[in-house]
Image (cartoon, rainbow, N blue to C red):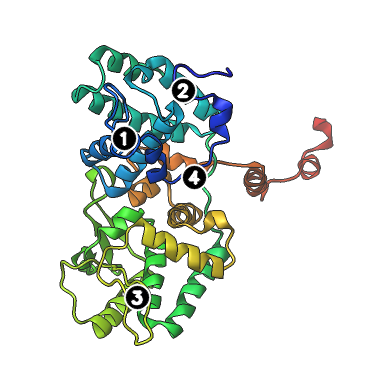
Amino acid sequence: MSEAHGNVPAMNDIATAPHDDVDEVLALALLEPGARAAVGELVAPAEELLAGFAATLVARPQTQRTYRRACARFVRWLGPLAGPEDLTAQNLARYHEHLVAGDRSSATVKKDRAALNSFVRWLAEHEYLPARQAREALAVRLPRARRQTRDTPKALSSEQYQRLIREAKARIADDPLAGARDLAIILVLGDAGLRCEELAELDRRDFLPARTGARLRALDIRHGKGDCQRRVKLSTDATRAIVRWDRERARALGDPTADDPLFITLGRRRHDGTYTHVGGRCHQEVLADILKRLGAAAELPPELRHPHALRHTCATELLRAGANVSDVRTFLGHASVKTTSVYLASGEDRQEHVVTLRERGRPTLNEDREAVSPGRF
C-alpha cells in the first residue's frame, strides 16, 4: 500500500525515516512556537499529552519509558498533523502490520500493543477520543508475527563471562571504589540473574545474612516485576564482592545506613579522588554504561554488552549446572514457565550432543549380532 490514510505518511517513507530521540519525535507533533493547537488534534500539544499519560502509569521508570517510546513511535507513524480521527481501528491494525513487516518479534509487537492500549484508554477517559472509536481500536486483533519461533536469548559463554569478571577485577587496581562496585554489580547480575530495576531498588538491608545452618547469603527482592517478591541465593563470589564493595564504600564515603541503596552512582572520578555524582540509585542507564565499558574491554560482541545479557547468562548457567525449569523460573522471578522455556531452545549442535550422550554405553549393531546365537538369524 503506497499511500496512508488521511495525514498518515506512506510506509516506504516511514521505513526510511531516522530513529529520532523521543523528545525529537514528540517535537515533530508540536506546532509553531506560540501557536494554539487546532481543535481536536491528537497531539496538541504532544509533549504534554504523552507526558501526562506516562505520569499516570503505576509502573517502574523503565516501564514508563518503554510505554512512552512505544506511543511516540505510533505518533510518528501517524504523522505530525494527525488528529483523533486518524486513531482508528484500521490505522492501528495497519501499524501492527507495519511492525510485523519490519520483522519485529511477537514479543515486541505485543509490548507496543500493550502500551497503545493503555494510551487509547487514557485518551478516551480524558475525552480526547470518542468512546466508540476507542472500543473499536482496542478490539483490533494482533497479526501473527512472521517469526514463528522465538530466538534463543543471547548469553555469554563461560569463557566470555570469566573474561568480563577479570576486566572488572582489573579496574580495582586503578579505582578501588568504582572497581569494587562494578565487580559486585557484574556478579549480582550474572550469578543471581536480577533485572536492572530489581538491582537498582536494593537497599543494604536487603543483603541478608545466612540463615542458621545455611552457608549462602541471599538478596531480598522486594520490588520485583509486577510487585512480586522473592529471595535469591548468592554465590560465594557475589557475596564476597558485595562485602568488599561495602567496605570500600564505608572507607571512602563514610558509614552508610541500612536503608541506603546497596549500589550507588559515583559519576566520574576527579583528579583529587572525589566523584561527580555520588549517592543515586544505579538504574538502567548506569548499568548499561558499566556493561558497555567493561564489555568492550573484555572484547565481547556488541550485542552482549548490556545488563540483560547477564540475566540470560545466569539462566543458561543454571540449566548447564542441572537446574530444572521450575528452579530457573523461581530464581529469575518469571511469572510464567513459558518465559523460562525460551532458554530450552535446542539447535542441531545441541541435538547432536544429546543423541551422542544417549548412545554412550549402548552396544553397537555388530556387537548385538555377535552376542546372539547364529541360529536365531
- Provide the residue designation for mark 1: 46
Residues under numbered marks 3 and 1 in contact, where contact means CB atoms less than 8 Å apart = no
Quadrant of the rendering where the N terminus is positioned: top right
Inter-mark Cα distance, 1 to 4: 40 Å
Query: Secondary structure under badge 4?
Result: helix
- Provide the residue designation for mark 3: 240
Q: Is residue 373 left or right of residue 276?
A: right
Q: Nearer the viewer, mark 3 or mark 1?
A: 1
Residues under numbered marks 2 and 4 in contact, where contact means CB atoms less than 8 Å apart = no
Q: Name the N-terminal-most of marks 2 and 4.
A: 2
Q: Name the N-terminal-most of marks 1 and 4.
A: 1
Q: Is residue 26 left or right of residue 204?
A: right
Q: Is residue 364 left or right of residue 184?
A: right
> Which residue sits furthest front?
34
Q: Residues within 10 Å of mark 3 (few under 14, many from 20)?
A: some
Inter-mark Cα distance, 2 to 3: 57 Å
Q: Quadrant of residue 358?
A: top right
Inter-mark Cα distance, 2 to 4: 40 Å
Q: Residues within 10 Å of mark 1 (few under 14, many from 20)?
A: many
Query: Secondary structure under badge 3?
Result: helix
Report the residue at 19% width, 24% height from top.
125
Rendered location of residue 2, percent (x, y): 58, 19
